[in-house]
């Protein structure tokens, strides 16, 4: 497939509205407290009857210091002793779930996120992985996608060596920005040296892929300052690079209130940063995977996209076929047998449920047939940037044009603007439309409307 990307500032300004990121469909806005432990157990039973590989996610919420831009569910603490009782709770949760899951189901994907997973000591990381192996069947052939998020301030060569020995083969490094003024403004002081030392260690240990995460739109950023960070990153040639749009929502995320709004780049500057960065990345040989993600052409994500086998879940883009996701820890989100569920977000009720032998489910939903069909459309567009009506109709037992007779006319302005091309057989997202893929998906989302749209971040 053609993975070209064209930045059209006028179009982006016109289409830069609020919209979902579609890590799931229906989105978390639709979750309800009518979904609880009983519904999750029923979903696990259906999943077990279906069989197949599984994916595991572990949320490690602890951070040593707070980054002011952060919107994650976290616990900021200097007290390293808090992680040990949390591991005990994770083990209790694993034990409850593993009773419902056969050991012959292989774990194809595993991810530790947070927070800061490397907040854990080496002994605690070993304990968590050993416990995971006791409860589930992890791969020993290094063919799974076992990834971890790394704060380079909390890792060193010895820690990276241990993670590789434990079975991890992919890491993502949080960078955000190397400019000292920006780092001070967001309370994340992180040197080039410690960041690149971790990257070098990962390569020396034979990690399959190293990804680096940047954020544009932070206070005091300019085009020149951000390109300096990007140039330093590109010198290391990471396999993948994520460039996230900072969404300033201080009414929802308390740490963001510490950011001086007068220091925020104007919308035009933010857009210029994005444009210059895309030009830089393209010149350096990276291809746009979608939704803020870039990769080298020979990276497995780029290859999978060209081959039409790319997938997406709560952890982002993946090369592995979709499989049920079992998530553990406070606020973690599972996707099992057509149902999506979220654990409680606070430590006290999480501990109380598990100490009483209950799964700590707070809310969720089970997809209807309509949800499943619409989700399939959205995921196809986000991953492949195209959709074949006949093939989709055959796979889902519908007539695509009839089923989406209401949605398709809403794409007409995007045809006129050169975002997509559409005929009676296909939808194809054009190079000008790829940055606006969220907009292309939104007409197929039956839940969007009015105030609900405003609960999401801007698409750019």
Image (cartoon, rainbow, N blue to C red):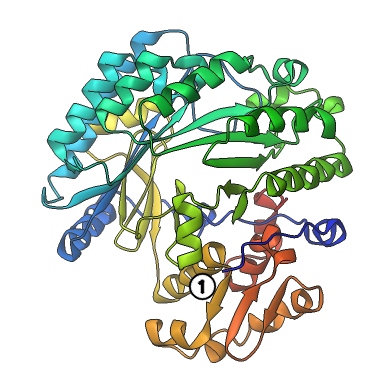
Whole-percent x, y for residue 203 in the image: 43, 29
Q: Is residue 141 shown left or right of residue 110?
A: left
Mark 1, secondary structure of its residue = helix
Residue 201: x and y, percent?
43, 21
Q: Look at the picture and state if 113 lies above or below 399.
A: above
- Report whether residue 200 is seen: yes
Image-quadrant location for residue 451 = bottom right
The residue sitting at 24% across, 32% down in the picture is 354
Report whether 92 appears left or right of 270. Answer: left
Count of picture labels:
1
The N terminus lies in quadrant: bottom right
**Which residue: 38% across, 82% down?**
395
Q: In the image, is residue 58 above or below residue 460?
A: above
In this view of the protein, which residue sits in the foreground, 88 or 162?
162
Question: Where, by quadrant of the figure, is residue 51 drawn?
Answer: bottom left
Compared across the picture, whether 124 is left or right of 3 comes to: left
Residue 317 visible in image = no
Question: Which residue bears the numbered disc 1?
Answer: 377
């Amino acid at each position: 497939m053609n993975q070209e990307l064209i930045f059209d500032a006028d179009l982006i300004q016109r289409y830069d509205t609020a919209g979902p990121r579609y890590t799931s469909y229906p989105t978390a806005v639709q979750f309800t407290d009518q979904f609880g432990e009983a519904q999750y157990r029923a979903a696990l039973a259906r999943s077990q009857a279906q069989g197949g590989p599984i994916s595991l996610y572990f949320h490690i919420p602890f951070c040593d210091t707070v980054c002011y831009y952060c919107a994650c569910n976290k616990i900021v603490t200097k007290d390293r002793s808090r992680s040990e009782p949390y591991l005990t709770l994770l083990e209790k949760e694993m034990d409850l779930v593993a009773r419902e899951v056969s050991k012959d189901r292989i774990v194809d994907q595993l991810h530790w996120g947070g927070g800061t997973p490397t907040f854990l000591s080496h002994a605690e990381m070993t304990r968590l992985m050993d416990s995971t192996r006791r409860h589930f069947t992890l791969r020993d052939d290094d063919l799974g996608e076992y990834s971890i998020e790394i704060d380079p301030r909390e890792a060193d060569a010895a820690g990276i060596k241990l993670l590789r020995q434990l079975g991890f083969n992919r890491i993502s490094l949080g960078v955000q920005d190397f400019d000292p003024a920006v780092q001070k403004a967001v309370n994340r002081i992180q040197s080039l040296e410690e960041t690149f030392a971790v990257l070098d260690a990962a390569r020396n240990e034979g990690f399959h892929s190293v990804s680096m995460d940047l954020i544009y739109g932070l206070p005091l950023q300019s085009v020149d300052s951000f390109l300096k960070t990007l140039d330093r990153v590109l010198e290391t040639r990471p396999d993948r690079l994520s460039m996230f749009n900072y969404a300033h929502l201080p009414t929802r995320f308390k740490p963001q209130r510490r950011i001086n709004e007068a220091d925020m780049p104007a919308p035009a500057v933010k857009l210029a940063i994005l444009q210059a960065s895309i030009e830089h990345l393209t010149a350096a040989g990276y291809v746009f995977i979608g939704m803020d993600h870039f990769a080298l052409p020979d990276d497995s994500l780029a290859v999978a996209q060209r081959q039409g086998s790319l997938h997406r879940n709560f952890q982002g883009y993946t090369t592995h076929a979709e499989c049920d996701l079992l998530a553990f820890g406070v606020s973690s989100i599972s996707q099992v047998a057509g149902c999506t569920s979220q654990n409680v977000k606070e430590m006290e009720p999480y501990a109380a449920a598990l100490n009483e032998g209950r799964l700590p489910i707070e809310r969720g939903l089970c997809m209807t047939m309509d949800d499943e069909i619409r989700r399939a459309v959205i995921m196809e567009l986000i991953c492949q940037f195209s959709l074949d009506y006949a093939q989709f109709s055959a796979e889902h037992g519908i007539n695509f044009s009839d089923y989406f007779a209401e949605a398709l006319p809403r794409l007409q302005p995007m045809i006129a603007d050169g975002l997509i091309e559409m005929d009676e057989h296909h939808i194809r997202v054009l190079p000008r439309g790829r940055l606006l893929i969220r907009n292309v998906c939104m007409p197929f989302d039956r839940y969007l409307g009015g105030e609900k749209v405003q609960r999401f971040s801007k698409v750019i």
